[in-house]
Every structure is written in structure tokens, then in C-alpha cells.
């Protein structure tokens, strides 16, 4: 499809919460090109902006104008109420009408209603095939679908509305690698205008421009994501140099003021001594000379104070342009794992679901030393099941699971490792055997939790913040884990949080088994071995316990 003059424009769009807190401030841009990646930290206002652009949410100020049909696909899809696949696709009424026509009992008004919709079934089949759902029945209940299947189905529903402008909110969340690649290929071939909020670096790199929301301000960069990253890095380095330079100027001006004031005091004292020695000078002249000296000193001091104030302002402005360091470096007091030490072994393992085996043949594999392994396979192939077996949360129906490594920590994507009703400090301190509050606070500060922030309840935190708390709790333990199990840790995280996690795990010296569809993440953490569950799965029947 060609862009026949379609465009979407935001004009000074602002949005504030009922308590007055500003989320977006005077956002203005024109989207008339193929694709824009919308990035920003969780809570920065990405979803809010998409909803405003789609007309679902009224802005506090400004306006939105569109030429073309705008369709919005939210991140969370409603599946309750006994709805079927055909209901989410929005074709139930059309299919009923077609069924009546085929049965020969449709009145003229029904025939007229579907005049331009005779190909609905064919269009649905084509779209479902493109996203890997060709086996899905239109009468299947939505509750029977996995999160990934539901998302792909919702995408088909959006495309059936024939959009000219497509707004997507984290469209690759919960998709396995094969499904992600299908969706990415479809998006690349679709030539309408796309604005996509995502932290998926593979998707980001396929889009034409990058729009960033940072501290409520919106900036559109007419460049692809890799160029944006290089540009932002260069800008931050320049800002750091400017801040360092202005800090030196400020220190120099303050030092100069001190030196000038010392010289003035010395000069004034010397002048007074000379005047006192001159017996012919009256007290009135002495007082007058002193007043003039004080006035001169005050004037010089005022000039230097203004210079210092200007230097301080310049320094603060330069410092404000420096974005906080995103790396987390944690010193884990842990000896490297001996290369030959067995961490775990699964021998002829299977589990049952609904009376049937999960895998068509038993699973056997092992891990030794400080190896970092990625566990891969399609959704429903049993990746989470393997992690639960290794963590002791699930017992096998057959075979043996041996885990000599101790302790083992399992970080699932829902972070059940944390107590949501306790504060950050309480969660971490409960794990820090014998550690003082001061030391726990120091560790938390390295994870960007400083001062009163440690008293926030975990339930109130974003996904990225919860992950940092989990890492702090993990690395403050009396004995660090020898095996770390990760289940889709980057799901629902912003880019900053992904990078923080990657840098934190660089300091971990134990073994690691990670489930992730984010191959950029797996590469960043140094996953050198892969175990693929695909060969163990029935093509028609995959479950996840």
C-alpha cells in the first residue's frame, strides 16, 4: 500500500494526571513517513501518547489531527466474557450473515449488509497465516489462547480494519522467536504509517525514525535506532565534558574571589596602618578612607559573586543535560565456578499435563562450570517447566533431576521472588545475612535506590525497578547463588532497564540458564550454549505448566 497523503500530527499535546503531575508537555510532531519507534522509560507516557493519538484519551492541552484511518493495538487485550476468536476479529456479525446467505434464508437487507464483505473468510485466513495462526479455529474461546497467540490475533483484528496509520504498543511482547520474525516481516512489508512503542531492539532497528519521551519532553530523531544510540552517546559525552569544564570554571571563580578578598583585606589593613603612622591625619579622614576601602571591596565582591552565579547557572544547565549512567556494576563476593563442577543434570525427564506427556520424548541435558546457557523453543514447548523443575517448584513424572549447585535462585518474569507488601529495604535486608542497614543501603544506592526511595513498597514499582530490587536481594545474600535461572527477564521492561540488567549480570560468576526471546539480551549476557526444546514437542500439541 502506498501512502496517499496520509499523516498524523500532534500540536502542542500535553497531558497531566488529576493530581497535577505532568506526563506529557507540548508534544508536537508530524508523522508522514513509514515508521517511527517510540521509546522511553516505563511510565514516561508512551502508552498515554498512543491513546491520545488514537482518540481514546483526551489531552489536557493541544490537539491531534489525522488524514487517514487510525487503528490502535493496545498492549493488554481483554479476553474475558466467553468471547471467541471471531469476536476479537470483529467478524461475528458478518459471518452470521454469510451463513444465512449460504443457507438461503437471508433477507435483502442482510445481503446488502455484506455486499463488500464476501471475502471476509479469505482475508482472515490470509492474515492468520501470515502471523502463524493458520490452524486457529474462528470458534475457539479466547481463554484457550496463550498470551502470544492472543497478541497475534489482536494484530490481525487491527489489520482487518484496514488502517492507514497503525499505532502499536509493545507488539512483540510474549511472542516466541518464530512468531516475532513473522510479525516483523509483516510489518516490514506493510507500507502504511507505523508508530510503535517498543523495547524490542530487533524491531527498533527495522524502523526509520526514533521518537523519545524523556522527562515529559518529546524529541523526534530522523535516524534509525543504531544511529540514534551513537548520537545520544556522543551528545552525553559532550554534555559530560561541558559539565566538567563549567565545574572547573565555577571552582576557579570561587578561588579567585577568595584570593581577591584576601588581597583587599591585606590592602585595607596596610592602608590603615600607614594612615595611623601619619600623625597629621585626623580621625575623620581615617574613617573616610576606611569607608571608601569597604565600598571598593564590596563592589569587587559583588562583581565576583555575579560571575560565580553565572558560572553556577552554566554548570547546573550543563549538568542537567547529562543523562544518568545506565550501567550497574555489582561486586559479587564469589569464587569462579570450577570448570568441571556439575551444576545440574536432567536425565530422561518428562512431565504430564492433562494425562498426556508434555514432550514426545524424554528430555536430557546438563550444565557444568560457570556456563551461560540459553533455553530456547516456541511458546508452550516447556521452557518454564524446565526452570521450575530445576528450582524444585515442580517434580518430574519420570526421569531424574539432579541439582548439586547450591543455592539456586529462580527469577521468573513475575518476580515472585519479592514480597510486594514489603519495602525495598525490607526485601533486600531480609536476605542480607548479618549485613548492617548502612551496607544494604550502600548496595541499593549502586542500583539507583537512594535515600527515601528504599522505603517504597515493591508493589508500587515498575517492572524494571522490581528487577533491580531482585538483583539487590540476590547479590546481598550471605552466599551468592551458584545457579541463576532467568525466565523472560526483559519482558515488559524499558530499554534502560534491559541495559542495566545486562551490565549487572556481567559481574555474576556463577552458572546461568536463561529463557528469553530477546537474542540481543542473550548475546549481551554471554550465552554461549543453546538448548532447543523444539525437537521434543508435538507440532499439534504444546503446553506450558
Image (tube, helix red, strand yellow):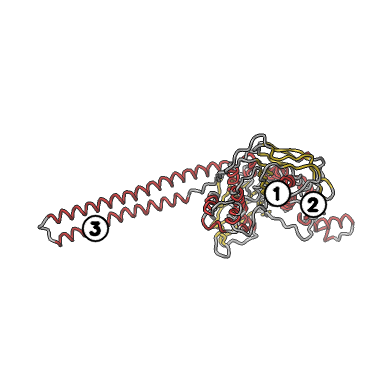
Rendering coords of residue 197 (x, y %)? 63, 50
Rendering coords of residue 133 (x, y %)? 78, 47
**Residue under label 1:** 174
- Looking at the image, do the residues carrying marks 1 and 2 touch, with CB atoms under 8 Å apart? no
Residue 294: mark in rendering = 3
Estimate how packed mark 3 is, as few (under 14), some (14 to 19) or many (20 or more) residues with alpha carbons within 10 Å. some
**Residue under label 2:** 120
For mark 2, give the secondary structure: helix
In primary-sequence order, the first of circles 3 and 2 is 2
How far separated are the C-alphas under marks 3 and 1? Answer: 74 Å
Q: Please tell me how many numbered marks the rendered image carries.
A: 3
How far separated are the C-alphas under marks 3 and 2? Answer: 91 Å
* Closer to us: 307 or 103: 307
Residue pictured at 12% horizontal, 58% vertical:
281
Q: Quadrant of residue 279?
A: bottom left
In primary-sequence order, the first of circles 3 and 1 is 1
Q: For the residues carrying marks 3 and 1, which lies nearer the camera in this image?
A: 3
Q: Residue furthest right?
A: 104
Q: Residue furthest top?
A: 340
Q: Residue furthest front?
A: 434
How far separated are the C-alphas under marks 1 and 2? Answer: 28 Å
Estimate how packed mark 2 is, as few (under 14), some (14 to 19) or many (20 or more) residues with alpha carbons within 10 Å. some
Rendering coords of residue 218 (x, y %)? 55, 52
**Residue 447 in view:** yes
For mark 3, give the secondary structure: helix
Residue 173 drawn above or below residue 522: below
Could you tell whether 216 is left or right of 143 in the image?
A: left
Residue 301 drawn above or below residue 378: below
Could you tell whether 307 is left or right of 13 in the image?
A: left
In primary-sequence order, the first of circles 1 and 2 is 2
- Looking at the image, do the residues carrying marks 3 and 2 touch, with CB atoms under 8 Å apart? no
Amino acid at each position: 500500500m502506498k501512502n496517499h497523503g496520509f499523516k498524523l500530527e500532534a500540536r502542542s499535546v500535553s497531558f497531566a494526571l488529576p493530581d497535577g503531575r505532568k506526563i506529557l508537555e507540548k508534544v508536537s510532531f508530524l508523522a508522514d513517513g513509514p515508521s517511527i519507534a517510540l521509546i522511553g522509560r516505563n511510565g514516561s507516557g508512551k502508552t498515554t501518547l498512543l491513546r491520545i493519538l488514537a482518540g481514546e484519551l483526551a489531552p489536557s492541552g493541544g490537539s491531534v489531527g489525522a488524514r487517514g484511518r487510525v487503528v490502535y493495538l493496545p498492549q493488554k487485550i481483554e479476553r474475558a466474557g466467553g468471547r471467541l476468536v471471531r469476536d476479537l476479529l470483529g467478524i461475528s456479525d458478518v459471518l452470521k450473515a454469510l451463513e444465512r446467505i449460504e443457507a438461503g434464508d437471508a433477507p435483502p437487507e442482510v445481503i446488502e449488509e455484506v455486499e463488500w464483505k464476501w471475502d471476509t473468510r479469505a482475508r482472515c485466513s490470509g492474515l492468520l497465516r501470515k502471523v502463524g495462526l493458520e490452524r486457529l479455529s474462528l470458534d475457539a474461546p479466547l481463554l484457550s489462547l496463550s498470551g502470544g497467540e492472543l497478541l497475534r490475533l489482536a494484530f490481525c483484528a487491527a489489520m482487518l480494519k484496514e488502517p492507514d496509520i497503525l499505532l502499536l504498543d509493545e507488539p512483540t511482547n510474549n511472542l516466541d522467536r518464530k512468531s516475532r520474525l513473522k510479525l516483523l516481516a509483516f510489518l516490514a512489508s506493510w507500507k502504511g504509517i507505523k508508530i510503535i512503542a517498543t523495547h524490542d531492539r530487533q524491531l527498533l532497528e527495522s524502523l526509520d525514525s526514533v521518537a523519545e519521551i524523556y522527562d515529559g519532553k518529546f524529541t523526534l530523531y530522523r535516524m534509525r535506532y543504531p544511529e540514534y544510540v551513537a548520537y545520544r552517546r556522543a551528545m552525553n559525552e559532550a554534555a559530560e565534558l561541558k559539565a566538567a569544564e563549567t565545574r572547573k570554571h565555577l571552582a576557579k571563580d570561587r578561588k579567585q574571589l577568595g584570593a581577591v578578598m584576601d588581597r583587599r583585606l591585606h590592602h585595607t589593613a596596610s592602608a590603615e596602618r600607614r594612615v595611623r603612622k601619619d600623625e597629621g591625619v585626623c580621625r575623620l579622614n581615617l574613617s573616610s578612607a576606611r569607608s571608601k576601602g569597604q565600598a571598593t571591596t564590596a563592589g569587587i565582591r559583588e562583581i565576583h559573586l555575579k560571575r560565580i552565579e553565572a558560572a553556577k547557572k552554566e554548570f547546573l544547565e550543563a549538568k542537567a543535560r547529562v543523562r544518568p549512567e545506565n550501567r550497574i556494576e555489582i561486586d559479587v563476593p564469589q569464587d569462579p565456578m570450577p570448570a568441571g563442577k556439575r551444576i545440574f543434570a536432567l536425565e530422561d525427564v518428562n512431565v504430564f499435563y492433562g494425562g498426556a506427556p508434555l514432550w514426545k520424548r524424554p528430555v536430557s541435558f546438563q550444565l557444568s562450570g560457570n556456563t551461560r546457557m540459553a533455553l530456547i523453543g516456541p511458546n508452550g514447548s516447556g521452557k518454564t517447566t524446565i526452570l521450575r523443575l530445576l528450582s524444585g517448584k515442580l517434580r518430574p513424572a519420570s526421569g531424574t533431576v539432579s541439582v548439586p549447585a547450591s543455592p539456586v535462585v529462580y527469577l521468573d518474569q513475575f518476580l515472585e521472588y519479592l514480597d510486594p507488601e514489603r519495602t525495598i529495604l525490607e526485601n533486600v535486608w531480609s536476605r542480607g545475612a548479618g549485613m548492617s542497614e548502612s551496607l544494604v543501603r550502600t548496595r541499593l544506592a549502586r542500583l539507583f535506590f537512594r535515600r527515601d526511595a528504599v522505603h517504597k513498597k515493591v508493589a508500587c514499582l515498575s517492572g524494571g525497578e522490581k528487577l533491580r530490587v531482585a538483583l539487590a536481594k540476590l547479590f546481598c545474600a550471605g552466599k551468592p547463588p551458584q545457579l541463576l535461572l532467568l525466565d523472560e527477564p526483559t519482558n515488559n521492561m524499558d530499554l534502560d532497564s534491559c541495559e542495566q540488567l545486562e551490565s549487572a549480570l556481567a559481574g555474576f560468576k556463577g552458572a546461568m540458564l536463561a529463557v528469553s526471546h530477546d537474542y540481543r539480551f542473550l548475546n549481551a549476557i554471554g550465552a554461549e550454549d543453546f538448548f532447543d526444546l523444539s525437537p521434543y514437542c508435538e507440532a499439534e500439541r504444546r503446553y506450558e505448566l
